Image (spheres, rainbow, N blue to C red):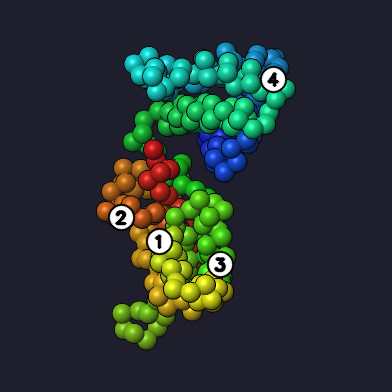
């Protein structure tokens, strides 16, 4: 459980750092908390190196792969020293901060991989709930296209889940079903011949933008194995929606992309 918690914390902080090229502190704070958890008698990023490295070496990315591909991979030990020293330096702005953030992200990726291995030593036992994004950002039919676009750009998402009415086979009853709206659909919709038309389309609610037809999604359960989930991806690699049934209502528990399984 602790391995999963720390892995998810690192992942969230890494995503924040990708949005802000100078936001390295979040990753470092998680590494410090991990060090404190592993060796409570020590204090400070530098003193936690031995304990944190003990976790990192579970991953081939820590030493094995760098030993064979040093031109593109830096050993974890060296990365840790660079991040620890950079964190203690006074100058944390501009190019220096961006460079430090890059190293912190590389450090986080190694630790995330190692924590995944600790969490699931045998990948055959891993399931969707271990990797899905919980409480995913969604769209609503009443959202103006401008807000759907904003949510995609703010979070660097290519797809947003949206619940839409779908007619049953008999054509009489209508049920609400989770689908996906894509960045490509929004981009094509906003490609207009005039600025006034673009303004009008930005203000239009998603449900009124009839040119945008939400994409049918594939569904998985949180308990499905990763192997079975990978087989559910289609040729377009559309995200999988993780759903459950609560009192007859379909609940969206999370979203799983191929990116989450790298």
In the rendered view of the protein, which quadrant contains the N terminus?
Answer: top right
Residue 33: x percent and y percent? Answer: 65, 27
* Residue at image coords 51%, 15%: 77
Q: Is residue 72 above or below residue 181?
A: above
Q: Quadrant of residue 260?
A: top left
* 157 sits left or right of 16 in the view: left
Identify the residue under disc 3: 146
For the residues labelled 2 and 4, the Cα–Cα distance comes to: 45 Å
In the picture, the disc for residue 207 is none
Mark earlier in primary sequence (1, 3): 3
Mark earlier in primary sequence (4, 3): 4
Q: Quadrant of residue 216?
A: bottom left
In the picture, the disc for residue 88 is 4
Q: 1 or 96, which lies in front?
A: 96
In the rendered view of the protein, which quadrant contains the C terminus?
Answer: top left
The crowding category of the residue bearing disc 4, from other C-alpha atoms within 10 Å (few below 14, some 14 to 19, many at least 20), is few
Identify the residue under disc 2: 236
Mark earlier in primary sequence (2, 1): 1
For the residues labelled 2 and 1, the Cα–Cα distance comes to: 13 Å
């Amino acid at each position: 459980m602790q391995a999963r918690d720390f892995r998810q914390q690192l992942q969230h902080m890494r995503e924040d750092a990708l949005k802000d090229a100078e936001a390295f502190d979040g990753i470092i704070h998680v590494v410090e908390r991990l060090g404190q958890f592993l060796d409570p008698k020590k204090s400070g990023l530098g003193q936690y190196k031995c304990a944190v490295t003990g976790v990192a070496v579970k991953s081939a990315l820590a030493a094995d792969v760098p030993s064979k591909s040093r031109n593109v991979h830096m050993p974890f030990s060296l990365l840790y020293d660079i991040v620890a020293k950079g964190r203690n330096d006074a100058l944390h702005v501009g190019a220096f901060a961006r460079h430090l953030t890059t190293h912190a992200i590389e450090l986080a990726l190694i630790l995330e991989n190692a924590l995944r291995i600790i969490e699931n030593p045998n990948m055959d036992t891993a399931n969707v709930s271990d990797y899905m994004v919980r409480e995913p950002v969604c769209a609503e039919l009443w959202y103006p296209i401008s807000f759907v676009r904003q949510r995609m750009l703010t979070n660097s998402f290519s797809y947003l889940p949206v619940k839409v009415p779908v007619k049953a086979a008999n054509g009489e009853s209508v049920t609400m079903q989770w689908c996906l709206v894509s960045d490509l659909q929004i981009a094509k919709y906003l490609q207009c011949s005039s600025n006034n038309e673009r303004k009008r389309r930005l203000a239009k609610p998603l449900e009124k933008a009839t040119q945008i037809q939400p994409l049918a999604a594939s569904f998985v359960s949180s308990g499905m194995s990763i192997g079975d989930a990978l087989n559910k991806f289609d040729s377009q690699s559309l995200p999988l929606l993780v759903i459950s049934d609560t009192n007859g209502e379909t609940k969206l528990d999370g979203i799983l992309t191929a990116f989450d399984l790298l």
